[in-house]
Image: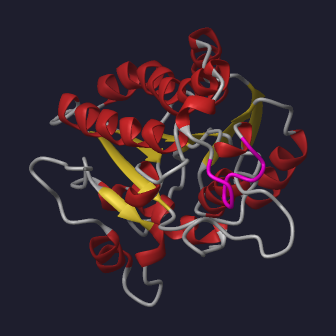
Amino acid sequence: MSATRLDGKVAIITGGGRGLGREMALAMALAGAHVVITAAKAVDELAATLSELGPGARALQADVTRPEDCARVVAETMAAFGRIDVLVNNAGRGMRLVSETFTTRPVPFWEVPHATWREIVDINLNGAFAMSQAVAPGMVARGHGRIINISTSDITMVRKGYAPYGPSKAALEAMSRCCAQDLAGTGVTVNVLLPGGASDTELLPGGPGRRGADGNLLSPALMRDPAVWLASDASAATTGRRMIARLWNPALPPDDAARLACSAPVEKPALM
């Protein structure tokens, strides 16, 4: 069996009903994984599609900002499949909560409602923490696990008019690095995956000329191959790294594509 196959593995993908999450869920199902997707709303139709593509799938309605929901997702996944090998923290909210014109008319931070700031940070950062905390003990006990946190480009973290979305992802990456060190030597890895530019998802407003602030509009499907590799046994020696999906070259062997898609490690990150 190829090291990049996921046969028999069980993956939880938060926010798996659309966008980047849906593409990663479909890819992991095609690679042989049992996939559990979570979403704030029911996603039974997608679960049916996943069942056709892979050996098994579940769709669970859950709010990742509620630790009790995260614990329930883990418990129901264990009851259905007996194990959890992969967690993809993909659930997130973006700047559309602040303004539908944020890509053309940046909103200064002092105009962002406190409730909106809290909601974005709560989902993008605290939700990933709560889900990671829920799966980590079981993964450590089994000596195997993959946690993949979905992030954004460096420039987006500090771009004018992108608070709190950008800062929430910067915090997520800092958390990822901390968690990777906490889990060193346990068989559980923690890595960051990002598209590498604005993607064609609901995080962007609709309308003609739809593009991100960087002028890009990448296909969400570019997340498929790197997500499967990070979830697979092939990535066992890779932790605390940052992979940019746009740099993944499908013409190369997966290990080579992964190596070239990873940002160079830095001893001390610097954002300013």
- Where residue 172 appears, as percent x and y from the top left, is 40, 37
Q: Is residue 258 above or below residue 102?
A: below
Residue drawn at x 47%, y 36% as measured from the top left: 168
In the figure, 75 relative to 258: above or below? Answer: above
> How many discs mark residues in the rendered view?
0
Q: Is residue 236 inside the magenta stretch?
A: no
**Occupied quadrant, residue 28:** bottom right
Left or right: 232 as drawn, with respect to 84:
left
Q: Residue furthest top?
A: 68
Q: Is residue 207 visible?
A: yes
Q: Position of residue 178 (x, y in %)?
A: 24, 32
Residue at 68% across, 61% down:
104
Task: Judge whether 236 appears above or below 110 on screen.
Answer: below
Magenta stretch containing residue 100, yes or no?
yes
Percent position of residue 197, x then y = 52, 68
Which residue is located at x 43 percent, y 39 percent?
167
- Relative horizontal placement of residue 170, taking residue 250 as reference (left or right): left
Q: Nearer the viewer, residue 159 or 61?
A: 159
SS assignment for the magenta stretch, majority: loop
Q: In the figure, residue 39 lies in which quadrant?
A: top right
Q: Quadrant of residue 183?
A: top left
- Image quadrant holding the N terminus, namely bottom left
Residue 231 visible in this rendered orientation of the protein: no
* Viewer-closest of 9 and 124: 124
- Magenta-highlighted residues: 99-106
- Residue at 34%, 48% (x, y): give it: 191
Q: What percent of the width, then of the height, locates residue 89? A: 52, 39
